[in-house]
Image: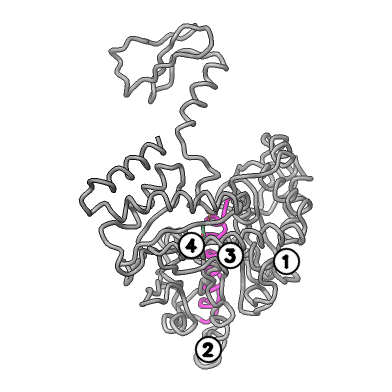
């Protein structure tokens, strides 16, 4: 074994990984936080990493994430063929670059834009940063042209925005005007949005749909209220739609819903290719209505890769695999395929939400009829345990269902949320309901004395799990 570092137990179990390969080799010890001095053969190195990863949760049972956890083998093959292509080398890999532009055109068409411009990103977070920067720069240009101050830009959005928007505001010195929740209003409404706008508002973010509960924000109503504000006060405030999930759900499941470039006030839309675009992480998309919505002075032109390439991105190098996989999915599924997949997710979400509501101890906040995502809390009168206990008990059975509290003004509300994705079938939903039915009696009785019959049935349940 060519390892030239100490393998004595005195190195301590925390600092070192003791490996006893299942192959017929000498046991070795590998430092955890220090580059090993020597080399390992590839089979042992693979086994070490593989074994560590076994302790991660099972991605398919992860109902916390919006991100794709299953792709078909042919898509994986294509991705592997492109691992070595850097997306930024557009002159060297012109076909990959062309596929990216075809995807932008397909999305623009899906979202009813005619002269759109756009690009791929690492995910919706980067896409939102780019969209926010374009809003800020357009506002600066308008203000400077009118001889007005550009000192205090602000962005109006519901407090339910995903953290990427708070990051945007923090990193680029924009005041985040977060409209709080109120009672049973868990997202931005038109009425509230306009109250927070003024001459320094660079834009309003409308979310399709909310990360907290899967609900769609009323984009058309927000746009109409901003049209009225424009007429009354002269402030022409554009809207960005954060369609991280919903921009790949609504076109297929709610084709008559007006939320996209059909609304003239919508300047830009982002989505995560790696959410309901059905690609493994990480790919996102940002599309502007037209070239005017993306100020030219944000676009860099570099010539050191050969040719002159326009770029608007936060990072430079990035794998081509995800963009290629996105194009593959678009070809493979088409409108019919995406409609079938997203509709199935919605059916599973709606039916699972109904069954969870019927169990008794829960109250639904949303029911999966917008994003195939729903949030639920404990029903009135359920005491002695919390949604966090439910989450922990489900985790013991392998299910990852997150529990969290809502933001300002509704911190009192703690919920569980289930995200239904491609690959989560009615069968798996049945198994999840079985798991809930198994854990609930124990949780609901835990503040009561455990003896006699009750304790016998409890230990039976525990034994079953073991
Ligand atoms: C509404 C919304 N916007 C933005 C994001 C960030 O997306 P990404 O993980 O693709 O960066 C998310 C992620 O959940 C989201 O739900």
Labelled pair 2, 3 in contact (Cβ < 8 Å): no
Rendering coords of residue 412 (x, y %): 30, 67
The disc at residue 322 is: none
Q: Earlier in the sequence, mark 3 or mark 1?
A: 1
Total marks in image: 4
Between disc 1 and disc 4, the foreground one is: 4
Asked if disc 4 is less than 8 Å from ligand 1, the answer is yes
Q: Earlier in the sequence, mark 3 or mark 4?
A: 4
Q: Earlier in the sequence, mark 4 or mark 2?
A: 4
- Secondary structure beneath label 4: loop
Asked if disc 3 is less than 8 Å from ligand 1, the answer is yes
Front-most of 114 and 215? 215
For label 2, count other residues whose C-alpha is less than 10 Å away and answer few (under 14), some (14-19) or many (20+): few
Judged left or right of residue 326, residue 122 is: left
Magenta stretch: give its range: 122-146
Labelled pair 3, 1 in contact (Cβ < 8 Å): no
User: As displayed, is residue 424 above or below residue 15?
Assistant: below
Labelled pair 4, 2 in contact (Cβ < 8 Å): no
Q: In this figure, which residue is indicated by the disc labeled 4?
A: 211
Q: In this figure, which residue is indicated by the disc labeled 2?
A: 234
Between disc 3 and disc 4, the foreground one is: 4
Between disc 4 and disc 2, the foreground one is: 4
In the image, farthest residue toward the left: 449
Tell me the CA gap for discs 1 and 2.
Answer: 31 Å
Q: Residue at x 30, y 42 (%)?
A: 456
Judged left or right of residue 73, residue 62 is: left
User: As displayed, is residue 271 above or below residue 302?
Assistant: below
């Amino acid at each position: 074994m060519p390892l030239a570092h100490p393998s004595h137990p005195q190195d301590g179990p925390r600092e070192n990984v003791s490996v006893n390969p299942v192959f017929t080799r000498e046991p070795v010890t590998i430092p955890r936080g220090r580059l090993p001095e020597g080399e390992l053969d590839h089979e042992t190195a693979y086994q070490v990493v593989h074994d560590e990863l076994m302790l991660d949760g099972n991605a398919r049972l992860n109902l916390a994430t919006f991100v794709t956890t299953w792709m078909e083998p042919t898509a994986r093959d294509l991705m592997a063929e492109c691992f070595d292509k850097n997306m930024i080398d557009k002159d060297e890999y012109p076909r990959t670059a062309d596929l990216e532009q075809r995807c932008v055109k397909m999305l623009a068409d899906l979202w009813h834009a005619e002269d759109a411009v756009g690009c791929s990103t690492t995910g919706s977070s980067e896409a939102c940063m780019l969209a926010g920067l374009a809003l800020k720069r357009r506002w600066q240009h308008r203000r400077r042209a009118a001889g007005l101050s550009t000192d205090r830009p602000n962005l109006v959005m519901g407090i339910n925005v995903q953290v990427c928007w708070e990051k945007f505001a923090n990193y680029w010195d924009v005041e985040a005007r977060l409209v709080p929740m109120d009672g049973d209003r868990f997202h931005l409404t038109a009425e509230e949005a306009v109250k927070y706008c003024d001459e320094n508002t660079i834009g309003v973010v409308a979310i399709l749909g909310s990360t907290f509960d899967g609900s769609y924000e009323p984009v058309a109503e927000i746009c109409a209220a901003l049209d009225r504000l424009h007429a009354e006060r002269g402030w022409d405030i554009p809207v960005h739609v954060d369609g991280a999930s919903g921009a790949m759900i609504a076109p297929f499941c709610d084709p008559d819903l007006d939320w996209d470039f059909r609304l003239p006030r919508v300047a830009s839309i982002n989505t995560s290719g790696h959410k309901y675009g059905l690609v493994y992480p990480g790919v996102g998309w940002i599309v502007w209505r037209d070239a005017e919505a993306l100020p030219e002075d944000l676009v860099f032109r570099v010539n050191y890769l050969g040719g002159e390439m326009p770029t608007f991105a936060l990072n430079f190098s990035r794998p081509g695999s995800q963009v290629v996989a996105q194009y593959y999915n678009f070809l493979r599924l088409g409108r019919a395929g995406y409609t079938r997949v997203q509709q199935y997710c919605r059916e599973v979400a709606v039916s699972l939400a109904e069954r969870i509501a019927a169990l008794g101890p829960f109250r639904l906040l949303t029911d999966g009829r917008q994003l195939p995502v729903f949030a639920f809390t404990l029903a009135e009168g359920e005491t002695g345990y919390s949604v966090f206990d439910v989450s922990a008990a489900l985790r013991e059975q392998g299910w990852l269902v997150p529990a969290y509290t809502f933001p300002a003004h509704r911190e009192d509300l703690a919920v569980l949320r289930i995200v239904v994705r491609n690959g989560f079938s009615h069968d798996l939903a049945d198994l999840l309901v079985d798991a809930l039915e198994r854990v609930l009696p124990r949780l609901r009785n835990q503040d009561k004395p455990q003896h006699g019959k009750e304790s016998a049935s409890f230990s039976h349940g525990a034994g079953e799990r073991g």
